[in-house]
Each structure stands twice: as C-alpha cells, then as structure tokens.
Amino acid sequence: MKFAPVLGSLVLFGVIVQIILGFQVSAGVDELIGAHILMGVAGLVVVLVLTAMAFRSKSATIYPKVIMGILTLVVLVQIGLGFQLLNGADALAVSHQANAFVILGLSLLIGAITMKAAKKQSSPSSS
Ligand code: HEM
C-alpha cells in the first residue's frame, strides 16, 4: 500500500488542475482542450490502479473499496459526458461541472481515509 498515498495525492492534484482547465476551456481557451482530455483519461487509469489496490489490500476496510468503486464509476461518467460535450451536447455542461465537484469530494474523502489508515499502521500501539 506504499504507493497509495502518492497516487491518491496525484489524483487529488489532477482533479484540481482538471477543474481549472475545464473552466478555462469553457471560457474559450480552446488550446487547453487536448490537455484536459488527456488528463481526464490518464486520471481514469490512475483511479483504476488505486481501485485495484484497494480491493487487493488485506488491511483495507470496506470504506475505501466502496468509495473507490464509486469514484471509478463517476470518473467514467465524467469522461462519457466530456466526449458528449465535444460532440456538441452543450446542455450537459452543467452535469459535467457538477460531476467534477463530486469527483473532488470523493478524492478528498479517500485521501482522508488513506491518511487515517497510514497513521494507524505506523503507530506503535496498533502494530
Ligand atoms: C476527471 C475528469 C474531468 C474533470 C474533473 C473535468 C472538469 C471540467 C470542468 C469543471 C469544466 C467546466 C464546466 C463548465 O464551465 O460548465 C469542464 C469543461 C469541459 N470538459 Fe471536462 N473534466 C474532466 C474530463 C473531461 C474529459 C475526459 C473530456 C473530453 C473527453 C472533457 C471535456 C470537456 C469539455 C469539452 C468542456 C467544455 C464545456 C463547455 O463548452 O462549456 N472533460 N470540465
């Protein structure tokens, strides 16, 4: 589970950058759309790796498994919405925006759970 905090921080950082990029794109900075798409898809890969780690971990409780499962689905939906936006479904921009904040919230939550678990593992009383 050593890589989990690193990958988790990467996801959190990536989501914040994605939200900033997204608002730039919708404000008309079209050059950033490529980076926005690339980061979205790369983010899905990292989320999938983290989800696999959560499910394979013996020490993890049910919470990281459920939250990572939900996060995977929400990121998939976000990419689906993104491609529909690219195809001109402008009415979906609101859903794409709202979904972005759901992803941010879940990333923060999983970060908090990971930190709590790491603290527990490193404290002498519980080992
Ligand atoms: C985790 C991944 C993603 C996050 C957090 C995210 C977040 C955002 C946010 C916050 C906006 C601004 C929305 C608005 O102002 O209404 C936006 C816009 C946009 N995003 Fe994403 N996005 C993600 C992935 C993607 C992907 C994979 C694609 C394309 C395949 C995409 C395509 C777009 C497009 C086309 C816009 C501009 C919408 C408009 O014209 O208003 N996004 N994104």
Image (cartoon, helix red, strand yellow):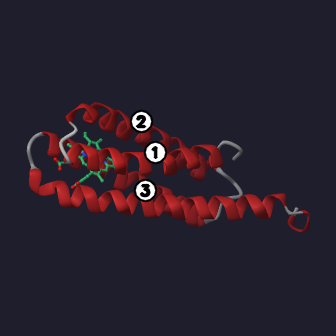
Distance from disc 3 to disc 2, alpha carbons, whole Å, reads 14 Å
Are the residues tagged 2 and 1 within 8 Å (C-beta)? Answer: yes
Q: Is residue 36 left or right of residue 114?
A: left
In front: 14, or 24? 24
17 up-or-down from 92: above or below: above
The answer as to whether callout 1 falls within 8 Å of ligand 1 is yes
Q: Quadrant of the C terminus?
A: bottom right
| Residue, disc 2 | 42
Q: Circle 3 sits on which residue?
A: 71
Residue indicated by mark 1: 14
- Residue at screen point 22% across, 38% down: 29
Q: Secondary structure at mark 3?
A: helix
Q: Earlier in the sequence, mark 3 or mark 1?
A: 1
Q: Give the mark toward the camera: 2 or 1.
A: 1
Mark 2 nearby-residue class (10 Å; few <14, some 14–19, many ≥20): some
Tell me the CA gap for discs 2 and 1: 9 Å
How crowded is the residue under tag 1: few (<14 C-alpha within 10 Å), some, or many (20+)? some
Residue 45 occupies which quadrant of the picture?
top left
Q: Amino acid at mark 3?
A: Leu
